[in-house]
Image: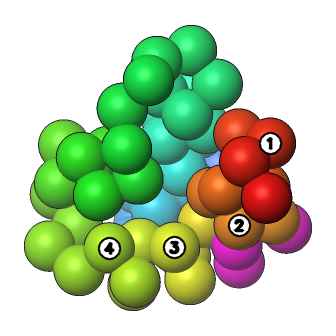
Amino acid sequence: MVRRSSGYPLHEYIHRLKMAEAKNLLLNTPLQVQEISGMLHYNDPFYFSRLFKKYMGISPQESRGNV
């Protein structure tokens, strides 16, 4: 059902939603990447950063402008 409406398998759709929320948190809060990854239930901040770059095209730090 999700695939029909979004065009993505369920797991990818969930990752995309979480990455959109992560981007919002990075841009609008002072939270650290590790805190955001934990809030979104990614226990490994490095895995979270890899997924963020995969879906957003830039690293979490680049998204915030801290590079």
In the rendered structure, which amino acid carries the disc numbered 1? Answer: Gly
Question: Residue 59: which numbered mark, if any?
Answer: 2
Q: Amino acid at mark 4?
A: Pro
Can residue 60 be seen in this snapshot? yes
Q: Is residue 55 magenta?
A: yes
Label pair 3/1, CB-CB below 8 angstroms: no
Q: Quadrant of the C terminus?
A: bottom right
Does 53 appear above or below 31?
below
- Do labels 3 and 2 touch, CB within 8 Å? yes
As helix, strand or loop, the secondary structure at mark 1 comes to: loop
Report crowding for label 3: few under 14, some 14 to 19, many 20 or more residues within 10 A (C-alpha).
some
Cα–Cα gap, marks 3 and 4? 6 Å
Front position among marks 3 and 1: 1
**Left or right of 11 on screen, residue 62:** right
- Residue 45 marker: 4
Q: Quadrant of residue 27?
A: top right
The circle on residue 49 is: 3
Residues drawn in magenta: 53-57
Dot 2 or dot 1, earlier in sequence: 2
Which residue appears at 44% of the width and 23% of the height? 30
Q: Are marks 1 and 4 in contact (CB under 8 Å)?
A: no
Q: Which of the two residues, 16 or 37, is positioned nearer the viewer here?
A: 37
Marks 1/4: CA distance? 18 Å
